[in-house]
Image: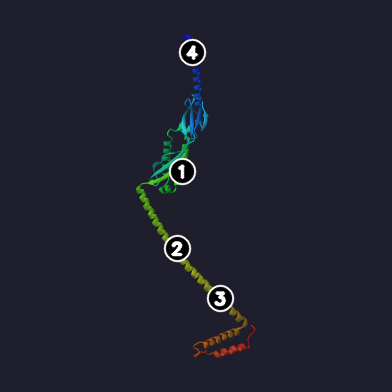
Amino acid sequence: MTPDAIFDMILQGGGGLIFLLIAILIVVLVFRAVKIVPQSEQFVVERFGRLRSVLSPGINLIVPVIDSVAHRISILERQLPTMQQDAITHDNVLVKVDTSVFYRIVQPEKTVYRIRDVDGAISTTVAGIVRSEIGKMELDQVQSNRSALTASIKEQLVSVVDDWGIEVTRAELLDVNLDDATRAAMLQQLNAERARRAQVTEAEGEKRAVELAADAKLYASEQEAKARRITADAEAYATGVVAEVIKANGLEAAQYQVALKQVEALSRLGESEGRQTLILPSNLLDAFGDAFKMLKTPKKD
């Protein structure tokens, strides 16, 4: 076989090889151009070292060789490890505060190119905010206004991390711890406050009992006065009626009634057990005579 024949054979075989290489290159370029982004991630694409685009979940196309996926960012919610930092209250009490932060990345292009250590930056920011807010409150306010303190911490943290493309979903103030000396002092103060409240309650009860007793006496006096007034009014009314009768019928009608009462009294006295002894008034006969005289000549009224 001549050398020319061998060269022609190589050329014929090489054409098929080149076609195969071209086909493989096209397949590789297609695979590099198509990017499938998972639901929980976003891809940051760079072109010649500069930000090109951010790929959302699903099928995306890029220019192969020219564009490249520089960062794969998870958009799932993250939780920072529980952080503990010291803080001093407005009344100079040292407390240890435990906090926890939940966040997620919503703008990967900001997170990638504006901050290097996201977790460290958030932790430092939270520590500064917590110390600043607790420094404005006394210890009792920190214990009683924990929800308001948590809301304030979250509000300030949101305004800071917005430039980093981060959304703070929750910021929790987990616990406020005190040293043993402060805890013992607070317990002593609490016991003293409870004793004071008990004494105040007892004193108020005694005061109320005295007030109720005085009110009862006053009420009884008022009722007795009302009864006396009613009795006096009745007697006055009866006296007035008698006076009107005397005025209308004259003195003789009054004497007639008096005489009848004397006769009735003597009759009852005679019917009693001690009737063996009878005491008669000196003017008894005159009273009988007056009564009989009036009975004989009664007036129409």
Task: Give the Cα separation between the discs numbered 2 and 4.
Answer: 123 Å
For marks 1 and 3, the one nearer the N-term is: 1
For marks 4 and 1, the one nearer the N-term is: 4
Query: Disc number at residue 232?
Result: none
For marks 3 and 2, the one nearer the N-term is: 2
Q: Residue at x 40, y 58 (%)?
A: 198
For mark 4, what is the residue? 9
Task: Give the Cα separation between the discs numbered 4 and 1.
Answer: 82 Å
Evaluate whether residue 13 shows in this view. Answer: yes
Most foreground residue, 12 or 177 = 12
Which kind of residue does numbered mark 1 sit on? Answer: Ser
Nearer mark to the viewer, of 2 and 4: 4
Position of residue 297 in the picture relative to residue 148 (left or right): right
Task: Give the Cα separation between the discs numbered 3 and 4.
Answer: 153 Å
Q: Residue at x 59, y 85 (%)?
A: 256
- Residue 147: percent from left, percent from top: 46, 46
Which kind of residue does numbered mark 3 sit on? Answer: Ala
